[in-house]
Image: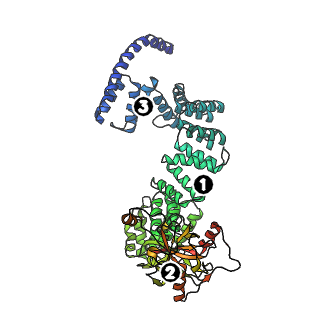
Amino acid sequence: MIFSNIAVLIIFLLPLVGCDKNDSEANSQEVTASMESKELTPAESIAMLQKAAGLGDAKAQFNLGLKYYKGEGVPKDSAIALEWFQKAAVLGFPDAQTQLGDLYGSGYYLPRDAVKSVEWYQKAATQGNVYAQIKLGMAYYKGEGVLKDTVKAEELYEKAGAQGDAKTQFWISTLYSYGFNAPEDAVKSAEWLQKAAVQGDAGSQTNLGLAYNNGKGVPKDATKGVEWYRKAAAQGYADAQFRLAWSYYKGKGVPEDALIAKEWFQKAAMQEDADSQFRLGEMYCNGHGVPKNAAKAVEWWKKAAVHGNQDAKFNLGEMYLKGEGVSKDIVRAYTWFKNAAIGDDTDLNMNARLRADWLEKQLTDAEFTEYQRLASDFVHMTALLESDDTEPLKNKPQKQATGTAFIISSEGHALTNHHVINGCAELKVAGRDGVAKVITSDSVNDLALLLLPDKSIDIAKLNPEPGKVRQGEDVIVFGYPLNSVLSSGGNLTPGILSALTGLGNNTNQIQITAPIQPGSSGSPVMDKKGDVMGVVSMMLDDGKMAKATGQVGQNVNFAVNGQTVRAFLDTNNVPYKTGGGVFSYEKENADIADEARKWTVLVECWK
């Protein structure tokens, strides 16, 4: 009976409340307009918000509730926040209704009550609030606060997604993908991803690319996967940039291209993507698509380690243990291995543990004390990342330039240019241990004879009749231009023998049209049989050419001719082989490249 009296009282009061509300709305709109018309200080903003909320503006009440909820501009007070949320929700503001749905559902600041949570979601959902529709669908799917009804749940998902919001569609696809509050359905997941992806949602584009790559919910198609990765990567989405880089790195859906892979890894790494940072370190360590540079590998692995990449931590332990890219430091090696050992019992964890146990037996008391200092903060790794560990490297030779050389004897003799080795403290060959020794060099003809640190089965053959080469013949150059960045597997460029003499009618040179870049110096110039007829020496400087003649030369490059090369080798008693004979024949460029790659090497000048 009491309830009936209250109901009657409310009915009689409704007209009065309605009139007051109209006046309040008008006043609150004036307050809101005043707030938006000028820049306010935080204190002024709160004051105006309180005034609008007091006048019955539901949006202002909700926003004021958020201020108290987060403690922004006012003391943090969940009780006051709830009062304002309640006021706004009663007035029908959907964001406030979903907020109460969340609070009742989670049990934060309010007693957990699944039924009340559903009631508030229901109110917001009927107003078309997509968040409430999804949350209500979840409740129906789980049977929390309502009777379980999977059909009703899917209807609500459909209703929310049909409103066209890409983020909502991405959310729905995730529910179906993982079977989280929805039946696991890869096809439906892909359908919702497609809807969001065509609207430009980068996360959906990336996941759709992954679906095509794995054939999950769509036909397996790595090429289509790359297309979607590329769209998201162009928007700066780091995960897509990593996946696009990996596609080029492995040649999945696109031709394998280490240079392009490096560019995309770099973009993602600059956004603190740990996997990309690790891969960049790997590329520099192996010289894959970039010049081999252990110090840069360490630099990228440190960045990845800070973001928790265990592989990077393990590799840093190896680098300090061997003294590659950093000074050899058993304490830091031990510290990195101990760090990498933390976690699940994966192969990496166990290997790190074994190395750490082995090193621990070798540590002195002073070294173990230093380890404790370095390991005092494994979270931020501040001490472990101190920059002074690389100071001694300043006094060690650093790689300054690269060139090309080719092997001409099974004993490991190799030819390159004098200017490639001139002034170098050390010469290293990419992918080989040890250093190369300079036996002799000829600055006039720009030739140098090296002895590589190991013998070789594969050697070049020289043109048997270097004096009979003819102007206009096809030539092929194989080498490692642009510091090996163009391709870690070498670079082939075809051209023609354009002149039988070089710069200033130099009879020890020939002129060729094959494009030459820095790093090509020392490359073999071959005929169509794959026999060496010269050694790349120089390219015409476009700037100097322009100043001298007012024109720029096109592919004007020079090489030491075959006669001069043979004379140089004969003078120094170096054995070599020549081509020709019954089994000599012209070959395809691809076959010449396959052969040249076996006996052509990248030479690094360290100073």
Q: Is residue 274 above or below residue 138?
A: below
Residue at the right extreme of this rendering: 582
Secondary structure beneath disc 1? Answer: loop
Residue depicted at 51% across the width and 65% down the height:
515
Q: Secondary structure beneath disc 2?
A: loop
What's the residue at 40%, 12% (across, down)? 16
**Mark 2 crowd level (few <14, some 14–19, many ≥20, 10 Å Cα):** many
Drawn side of residue 13 relative to residue 514, left or right: left
For residue 82, which numbered disc appears in the image? 3
Residue depth check, mark 2 versus mark 3: number of the one nearer the observer:
2
502 and 515: which one is in front?
Answer: 502
Circle 1 Cα neighbour tier, 10 Å, few/some/many (<14 / 14–19 / ≥20): some
In percent of width and height, residue 101 lies at 50, 32
Q: Position of residue 240 (x, y in %)?
A: 53, 50
Q: Quadrant of residue 14?
A: top left
- Labels 3 and 1: the sequence-earlier one: 3
Identity, as a three-letter code, of the amino acid under mark 3: Leu
Q: Which residue carries the number 1 mark?
A: 254
Give above or below for 459 relative to 269: below
Considering depth in this image, is 204 or 541 the residue closer to the camera?
A: 541
Measured Cα–Cα span from mark 3 to mark 1: 55 Å
- Observer-side mark, 3 or 1, equals 1
